[in-house]
Amino acid sequence: TFFDVPPAMASPYPPSAGAASPAPAPTLYGRRIEAYDKAVGLIREERYSEALAFIRSGSKDIRGWDGIMSLEAALLSQEDPQAALLLYDKILASESRGRHWARALAGYKFLLEALADQGDHAALFRLVKCLSFEWRNREARDMVSRALEDPLFPDPLREELSRLAAVLAMRHGDFAAAEGHFAPRADRSSLRWLSTLRVRQGDYKGAAAARRSAADTLKGAARTREHQRVLEILTKGGLPSDALALLEEFPELAETVPAWRYFLGIAHLSAREPDKALELFEAEETARGAKGERLQRASYFKGRALEMLLRHPEAAKAYEAAAAGPYGYYGLLAKGRLATLHDLPRGPAAPAARLAALLETPTGADRDSMAYYLWISERLQGPLPERAADFRPRGGPGEGPRARAAAFRHISMGDGGRAVAELKHTPQAVPQGAESSADELMLLAGLAADEGEYGLAARFLGRLPDPEKGREPPRRWNYPPAHAREVLTAWRGRGVPPQVTLAVIRTESAFNPDAVSASNARGLMQLLPSTAERIAQGLGEKTPREEDLFEPSLNIRYGTEYLAALLESFGSLPLALAAYNGGPFNIAALVRAREGVPADVFVECLPFAETSAYVRRAVESAYSYEAAYLGGGSLPDLTFPVARPRTPPPDF
């Protein structure tokens, strides 16, 4: 079996006993780090003018790096705050996010706070927007209240701040305050926000009316896009008659929304009209372009409609069609319904405990990565190669070969952290085609695993040719048992099943501990700093620094603490996952509005497309972890009616 494979080695690379390999040409990342370290050294010696001069003397590719720009902005904060703000704006607009981006955000807020304290109203406005972006809703609301009481606050900013105050009120569930701002206004932005407010109140007719009013202010394609949003609101709100009337009024929507039959069918299921839903799902199955996941989805919900009509033999045939398609979320749901209809087992007994037993680290050596080395060993279908420190990678021009050569040189000097940093921060380090040998790829994967960079290790392994061409690879190749120690600690302490924690990590960050989202969520389980602060308060612990969220052990401990609270409150995995991604207050409000709707239909009706997709991916991943290591997984059943939270959800 998989875990019977003995680990080839479970310790980091030792320093080479001989002379270090010749130094390769420095990589761009290497040159940036050298410049950064020198500048930091000068700053620590309080030689600020020299540090600034040194930074400004650097080449364009070094000065344009987030880390260096962040240092320059910090140095300019006192003597030229406006220039510092421009630099911070440039960093924060970057799509490249990580620790330096996070440090820049901290410096940006610190500067804005200082300027706001000096009476700079524009800085205060930017600070409120920053806090809102970070979902620090309480702090932002308090700051807005104080600002609006200031008679000297400029009128143009006051209006913008009032709008932001209404958005913050809506996030907090203070619908009356939000309504008081948006309802009297007829501009397009206010109408859109009013529509969002109505959805959160469960008033889908009102939401659609507000969005239609917004559409009336537009023409052409922009107007059609607004009508598409109106159709989405009506179908997700379980209002099929209104949605059909809209389609009749604007027939072009049938062309611009290819799957309109499916969405209308979901609306009929929400309204408990399975006979009408059945006709639409049957039409969707034969519609032009219906294949893959779209076809699976239609077949599964066709089966659900037939089952609601008590036509079980026909329902079983529809489920069989969905289960026979490409592997995925809807196929799993279909297999689950087939198991129920045929009175078959839905999965292995006690999967969490069985998976935990497999994930146990045999020796505790080399951090927690013993299980990961076993995973690598099977991926290679043999033991890991000897990881000699003096290995010579293939040479050649370009940043990729230089980064790999630099990594092996750092290994020869016993510096695994710097070696992995070279690989991680050089986009071309993971080779294409035949740039690297199989032995080199395996060595690099082992090196990344030594440093806990499991996502990077998986990328290197993904470049290895399949041992048997034409054979479907084992599912576990895409589901590594990474960070086993922290995952098991969460299971023992808070009861979060290992497969669920691993699924959330895989879905949130793809095992990248330095990941930063567009909303400033950080680390493996993508925690907002404000959420981590509330969790720390609940645990009676000191508030962690924002950078601490990049540490896997703390991130997983806090992330599973949050997930456990959501599971306890909502009582089911799909709703807890929806709350984890979309916010517990939002999901609780939607559940109250759609109480009694089957969970599988509720997931399709979530007004946040990202959250709906997130739940599907995470449910599928949790099953896949069980199937990968236990020989079979627990088939999900999402036919239960959604109910209000059993306890108030955590207000994070």
Image (tube, grey):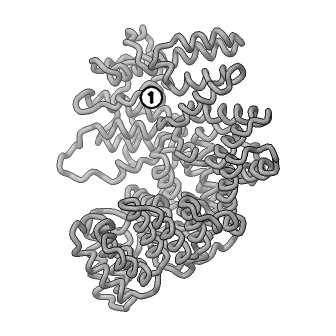
Q: Residue 341 location in percent, x, y?
A: 36, 83
* Image position of 254 (left or right of 60): left
Q: Residue at x 42, y 47 (%)?
A: 480
Q: How many marks?
A: 1
Q: Residue 456 location in percent, x, y?
A: 41, 36
Compare residues 292 and 191 and report the one nearer the observer. Answer: 191
Q: Would residue 539 be visible to someone looking at this image? A: no
Find numbered disc 1 in the image and state the secondary structure of the residue it sits on. loop
The extreme left residue here reads 470
Q: Residue 455 location in percent, x, y?
A: 43, 40
Q: Residue at x 56, y 45 (%)?
A: 485
Q: Which quadrant holds the C terminus?
A: bottom right
Above or below, comparing residue 605 to residue 472 in the picture: below
Asked which quadrant contains residue 75, the reply is top right
Q: Residue at x 79, y 33 (%)?
A: 118
Q: Would residue 210 be visible to someone looking at this image? A: yes
* Image position of 153 (left or right of 3): right
Above or below, comparing residue 285 to residue 455 in the picture: below
Q: Residue 606 location in percent, x, y?
A: 49, 68
Disc 1 crowd rating (10 Å Cα; few below 14, some 14-19, many 20+) is few
Q: Amino acid at mark 1?
A: His
Above or below, comparing residue 111 to residue 504 in the picture: above
The extreme bottom residue here reads 310
Compare residues 436 and 488 and report the one nearer the observer. Answer: 436
Q: Residue at x 43, y 70 (%)?
A: 232
For label 1, the residue is 425
Compare residues 233 and 191 and report the one nearer the observer. Answer: 191
Compare residues 413 and 265 and report the one nearer the observer. Answer: 265
